[in-house]
Structure formats: C-alpha cells, structure tokens
Amino acid sequence: MEQLKSIFNGIGEIGFQIAEKIKTGDTGKVEHYNQSGDQQVKLDLVSDQIVEQVLKKVEEVGEIVSEEKREPVRFREGGFKIAYDPLDGSSLIDVNLSVGSIFGIYKGEYRGDRLVGAVYIVYGPRLEMVTAVPGKVLHYRERNGKFEPVGEIKLKEKGKILAPGGTQGKWFPFHKGLIDSLFREGYRLRYSGGMVPDLHQILLKGGGLFSYPATTDKPAGKLRKLFEVFPFGFIFKEAGGEAIDGTTDLLELGVKGYHDTTPCFFGSKYEIERVRKTYLEQKERIKRY
Ligand code: AHG
Ligand code: MN
Ligand code: MN
C-alpha cells in the first residue's frame, strides 16, 4: 500500500532520531506517571515528542495516541490512526540493554481487527526496523545512515526458546505447569525484560514463545493492547505464527480504553497450540465448579 510507505519512512526517521537521544540523553526519571501507573523516564517523554513531531508532518496520518498520552492527538480529518509505545523497555536504558519503539497503524478505529500495518524499531548494538503488512514481514538494518532490507521474516512451526514474563511467584499453578513442561522439553530461557528485543529474537530465530500471562496481582496482565500487544500480534500472525490471550486471537479482543492491558502469548504454531490446550482445559475446569 503506497500510503503506508510514507508512514514507514516517517517511522524510519523517528528511529534515527530516538537512537541519537538514547546514546547521550539523560537516563533519569521524572516525577510523572503515565496512564498505566509507570514512572516515566525523561527519554520516554523526549521519544514521545519526536514521534509526534515527525508524524504530524506525514499527510497520511490523521491521529495518534501513545502510552505516554492520556488521549489521542488529532492532526487532520481522515487518515490513519497510529497508536505507539515510543520507548519500550525504558527501564533497561540505564543498564544499557536493548530497547525499542512499537507502532500500530489503524484504519477507522483502534481495534485489533482494524490494523493495516505494524512496525517496530530495535535500538540494540545495531539499529534495526521490522515492518509488517498483510502477508509480508520485512527486516531492515541500518547501513550508512539508511535502513536497508535484510530479508523476509517467516516463523517455523516450532522454536527452541522461551521468554516467560510476569512475576513467577504470582503465576497461576496451571501456567507454571505449562512453562515448566516446555523447559523439560528442552526449551532455553531468553528473557531480557524488553518485549521488543525478546520478540525480535523469537522472530529471527524462527520461533519460540513469549508470554506475559494474567497473574494473581495483575489479572489483566501488564502489556497494553493498543501500543504493544496488537502491533506484535499482527506481526506474529503475518510472519506465520500466532498470538492469543490464552484462548482467543489477540486481534479479536475488544477495547474499552486506550490503555487497556491483556494477558498475551506470541509464538510459533506448536508453542501456541500448547498454550491454547492448557488454557482451554483450565477454562473447562473452572466451568465444572
Ligand atoms: P515499557 O518500558 O514501555 O513500560 O514496557 C516494558 C514492558 C515490556 O517491554 C516487557 O516485556 C515488560 O514490560 C517487562 O515486564 P516485567 O519487568 O514485569 O518482566
Ligand atoms: Mn512498553
Ligand atoms: Mn514505553
């Protein structure tokens, strides 16, 4: 889609600008909390402003909303709506781990089934970008100040790595049983605490499972539908994998508020089938009581 091209170009430019700020910007916190109750770091706000300034100039963008904004900002009538996390994993910057930015491009409404494209940027040892449209997920890497295509991302049926999020002491026993049994099968632990690099690793290694489940202290999970979960759900599905909340396709979930969260699982087919079986059995068990 031609219109998405200028949006992808704008996001590429955002990637370069945020990467520059991450290199030398202040890693300190500010006395502000976002809608999800997270204490913001200065770079969250700086990154949010960079995205707003660049996207405002892109004709195809009608409106934006982000993890750091209470409500959407309208630029013009019509156009696509973009929901984004300007800096994901911002609490990892002071320890110099990889972080990212996540974008979902919506037509009409901010709903999973209205996504027409998604993009993420990885700020790691290298600067990389991944774009997704129906049927195609493309991987780019920075070279000489530009993003150059590396290749298409396609998931295999089954991977070898697990990124199990959430406080383990607060996991439900059936969830712990699932993760334990996957480790017994031979899966290896790969969890950095940044969903962008953790999911990027699964996508590039051909498969695996990332989970951020419901926990006893966070029954609706931690990750946000509009800014984190839907864009990655779209990317995983278009790369040949799946994305569910335990039983339901993430992109089919309803939305009540901009900052809604949901439990989420992203992975290749085999692992997601294991999740679905465990969570369906658990649902059945609850019904019987
Ligand atoms: P953000 O920095 O935008 O608030 O998001 C951090 C997210 C995500 O990147 C990561 O997977 C998750 O929080 C980690 O949470 P835990 O520290 O609870 O594992
Ligand atoms: Mn985030
Ligand atoms: Mn963030």
Image (cartoon, helix red, strand yellow):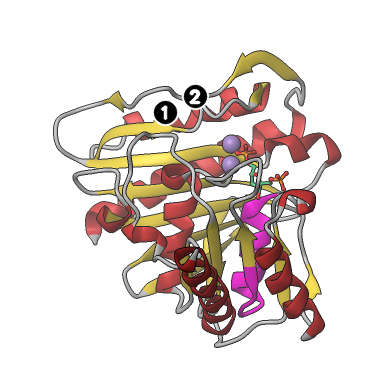
Q: Residues within 10 Å of mark 2 (few under 14, many from 20)?
A: some
Within the magenta stretch, is there residue 203?
Answer: yes
Q: Disc 1, ligand 3: is the CB inside 8 Å? A: no
Residue plotted at (59% across, 79% down): 271
The quarter of the picture where residue 178 lies is: bottom right
Q: Is residue 42 left or right of residue 65?
A: right
The main secondary structure of the magenta stretch is helix
Q: Is residue 74 left or right of residue 86?
A: left
Q: Distance from label 2 to label 1 (Cα)? A: 5 Å
Residue 70: x %, y % from top left: 42, 22
Residue 281: x %, y % from top left: 52, 75
Residue plotted at (63% across, 71% down): 209
Circle 1 sits on which residue? 52
The quarter of the picture where residue 29 lies is: top right
Q: Amino acid at mark 1?
A: Glu
In the picture, the quarter occupied by the N terminus is: bottom left
Within the magenta stretch, is there residue 86?
Answer: no
132 in relation to 185, above or below: above
Name the element at disc 2.
helix
| Span of residues in magenta | 194-209
> Depth check: 103 or 284 in front?
284
Name the element at disc 1.
helix
Residue plotted at (29% across, 54% down): 4
Tell me if residue 131 can be seen. Answer: no
* Extreme-top residue of the structure: 31
> Depth check: 53 or 200 in front?
200
Q: Are marks 2 and 1 in contact (CB under 8 Å)?
A: yes
Circle 2 sits on which residue? 49
> Depth check: 82 or 16 in front?
82
Residue plotted at (34% across, 41% down): 82
